[in-house]
Image: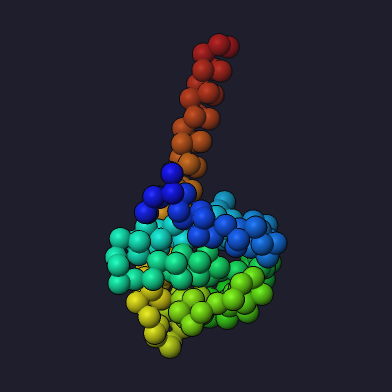
Amino acid sequence: MKTKGSREEFNELIKDLLENDLVQEMKKYRQHYDVSTYDHCLNVAYLCYKFTRKHKSLDYKSMTRAAMLHDLYLYDWRNHVKQSFFQMHAFSHPKTALINARKVTKLNKKEEDIIKKHMWPLTIVPPRYRESYIITWYDKYSTLSETRQYYKNKRKQKKEAKKAQKEENKKK
Ligand SMILES: [Fe+2]
Ligand SMILES: [Fe+2]
């Protein structure tokens, strides 16, 4: 049921975005470890949605939609081996994401600010809206959780492989 703060309501809010070809293209690129840029944006958007939906003074619609598009830069920065490229990417990708997001949907001023400032304080100009500050937090939080989950899965796989090997040795 589409109740306030539900996954269904969240899905409905970004339904048109998820159907867009450019947004779908994010599935091709790895954000970090085994998480695609698409899934990373979905994680950030859901966290932002859950938080802002609880507070009447916040614009949960703009928050959720912009969060889904915040990393729509559409390239794999790993293809560029130089460290300087990573640094450049960190500063420039919000702008690229914004240009692409404008092709996906009509953005309001708040949505533009959320996408453009999501790397703050790395990008010097501070956010204009509270929602833009919120994404700076959930983007970093999400990256940490995704990293932690990756290592957790790795450890689990290793443990299972060891166990299987032990069983195999027993049979011999
Ligand atoms: Fe980003
Ligand atoms: Fe991000």
Name the image quarter holding the C terminus: top right
Please indicate whether residue 51 sits to the left or right of residue 163 in the image: left
Q: Position of residue 118 (x, y in %)?
A: 46, 75
Answer whether residue 86 is visible to the viewer in this image.
Answer: yes
Name above or below for residue 34 compared with residue 37.
above
Q: Position of residue 165 (x, y in %)?
A: 54, 24
According to the image, what is the colour scheme of the structure?
Answer: rainbow
Name the image quarter holding the N terminus: top left
Occupied quadrant, residue 129? bottom left
Q: Position of residue 81 (x, y in %)?
A: 65, 70
Please indicate whether residue 35 sits to the left or right of residue 49 in the image: right
The extreme bottom residue here reads 125
The extreme top residue here reads 171
Front position in the image: 28 or 62: 62
Residue at (46% x, 32% y) in the render: 159
Q: Position of residue 132 (x, y in %)?
A: 41, 76
Residue at (34% x, 71% y) in the render: 58
